[in-house]
Amino acid sequence: MNAEELRPPRPARDVATRSPLPEGEGGVAHGRPDVEPAGARPAPPDEREGGVADRLVDSPPGGRRYAVKALWRTVQGEGVWAGRPAVFVRLAGCNLWSGYEGDRERDAARHGNACALWCDTDFTREGAVKLSADALAAEAARVGGAVRFCVLTGGEPLLQADAALVGALHAAGFTVAVETNGTQRLADAFGDGDRPDWVVCSPKLPEGALRLEACDELKLVVPDYRPAQYAAFAGRVREHGAGAARRRALWVQPEDGPRLAEATRLALDLVFEDPRWRVSVQTHKHLGVD
Ligand SMILES: Nc1nc2[nH]cc(C(=O)O)c2c(=O)[nH]1
Ligand code: SF4
Ligand SMILES: [Mg+2]
């Protein structure tokens, strides 16, 4: 069954623009259009985060292969490029948590990082597919259709991403962004070869432990990570824009989950206190997409 068949029948056009509710109960009197909430319709498989093993097989051994946990088309939900159509590639593995429930407290204590306690990302190697750079780029191009913006995420993507992978994506026409925790050096990952065009750092260790040389956006997940703790590292964020719009992209992003309300209040207080920082909203969650 394809996604189209899963959708409820489309109402006739004249009723689609009118609310079935009487006035005063969320109907036309409130100006609310009669639309389903975003994300109510099931997304096609290529637009869902899971299930890469269902459609892809390992590239033959021999050359360098990348463990890909998920590859899907969506919009970048966060930061400067929020709303930009993108192919997300989730590379398996992280250096700050094994990814298994039972290891959360051990790994948080081992590395001194709070994120192992709340990280909600599935980046374990189970179900990952090992793809060559060319196979990965070809799948990104197929899934992307007209989209040529690729976001490498994880886990920690710089444990795997290298110049050959970025080069293959560039050759397929992609602009490449990466979401890193800041523990890896770009020089170690990419040497003198192709590098990502855009680097987003969301640190999970104290700034003294960060080895990333520079980035284009800094995103702190509050309440555990706060601007005052990253004042020096914020100086490594490249400025973008012209004239008065020239600025660093410095974000505080409320942690999703049971602490969201408290974290949102803190994010607001932090940007009111120091307006160089902005509140980052996870727009993909509002849109109901992965
Ligand atoms: N659409 C979408 N945008 C994102 N931006 C950052 C993400 C992440 O999980 O790091 C993410 C994600 O998982 N989905
Ligand atoms: S560094 Fe990122 S992916 Fe790794 S455990 Fe922390 S939040 Fe999760
Ligand atoms: Mg996510």
Image (cartoon, rainbow, N blue to C red):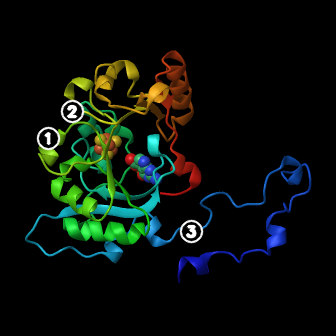
Residue 122 numbered tag: none
Q: Is residue 109 above or below residue 122?
A: above
Viewer-closest of 138 and 254: 138
Residue 213 numbered tag: 2
Q: Earlier in the sequence, mark 3 or mark 2?
A: 3
Crowd rating for badge 1 (residues with CA inside 10 Å; few <14, some 14–19, many 20+): few
Tag 3: amino acid: Pro
In this rendering, the label closer to the viewer, 3 or 1 = 1
Name the residue located 16 percent from the left edge and 58 percent from the top edge. 164
Query: Which residue is disc 3 drawn over?
Result: 42
Q: Are marks 3 and 1 in contact (CB under 8 Å)?
A: no
Farthest residue to the front: give it: 243
Measuring from the top left, give residue 34's x and y in whole percent: 78, 60
Name the residue located 87 percent from the left edge and 58 percent from the top edge. 21
Tag 1: amino acid: Ala
Q: How many marks?
A: 3
Q: Earlier in the sequence, mark 2 or mark 1?
A: 1
Q: Is residue 271 above or below residue 281?
A: above
